[in-house]
Amino acid sequence: MSAEWALEVFDRAPYITVSMTDKEEMPYCLPLSLVRTDEKTFYFHCAQEGRKLDILSKNPRVCLSAVSKCKPTVGPKDGSFTLEFKSAMAFGTAEIVEDDSEKIAALRAICERFLPQHMDAFETSVARSLSRTAVVRITLTEPPTGKRKQYDANGQEMKWGRME
């Protein structure tokens, strides 16, 4: 699927798994609440200390993956067990945001995505917690990719590019 389609999967996913590799080359993956602010930029927030920040300070390369639809089903043609899904992945580089205005903008975007009904409390919350909150920017290093398996109302699998 197209990069634009993959970005929509990221936007609709309830969380995005961020994968990284520690200094012993051990994989480390976390489902996080990311927000995308443009075609290449994602943000998440966390505590100012912890394993993920330790890993990212030594190796900032990451892989993002997300699933926005996952529905077990029986294949309409042959009765086989299968899974309808929409998924996306992308590679990027993570960096801790130091500038307070960028941190606040990222936190605002995160809150607008996940808690839009509570934006009236945003300013108070940020004033209280900004000094103890880390914000990480992930910049994609290549366009994202996406895959899906989906059937139409007649039981036909919708192959690449078919968007009804």
Image: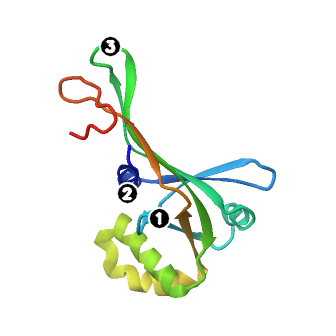
Q: 164 or 24: nearer the eye?
A: 164
Where does label 1 land, which residue? 40
Q: What element carries label 3?
A: loop
Identified by mark 3, the residue type is Gly
Q: Residue furthest right?
A: 24
Gap in Å between the C-alphas at discs 3 and 2? 32 Å
Q: Earlier in the sequence, mark 1 or mark 2?
A: 2
Q: Is residue 97 visible?
A: yes
Mark linked to residue 79: 3
- Left or right for 122, reference 151: right
Towards the viewer: 152 or 14: 152
Location of residue 96 by image quarter: bottom right
Q: Quadrant of residue 122?
A: bottom left
Say left or right for 119 vs 142: left
Residue 80 point in image, percent of width and height? 37, 15
Which residue corresponds to the image point at 44% horizontal and 80% vertical from the top-left?
Answer: 105
> In the drawing, what numbered circle is on residue 49?
none
Residue at 40%, 76% in the rendered image: 108
Residue type highlighted by circle 1:
Lys
Image location (x, y in percent) of residue 8: 35, 54
Circle nearer the viewer, 1 or 2: 1
Say which quadrant the N terminus sits in.
top left
Q: In this view, does 134 lie above or below 8?
A: below
Mark before the other along the chain sequence, 3 or 2: 2
Q: Are marks 3 and 1 in contact (CB under 8 Å)?
A: no
Q: How far apart are marks 1 and 2 (CA)?
A: 12 Å
Q: Distance between the residues labelled 3 and 1?
A: 40 Å
* Circle 2: residue type: Asp
Which residue is located at x 29 percent, y 26 percent? Answer: 157
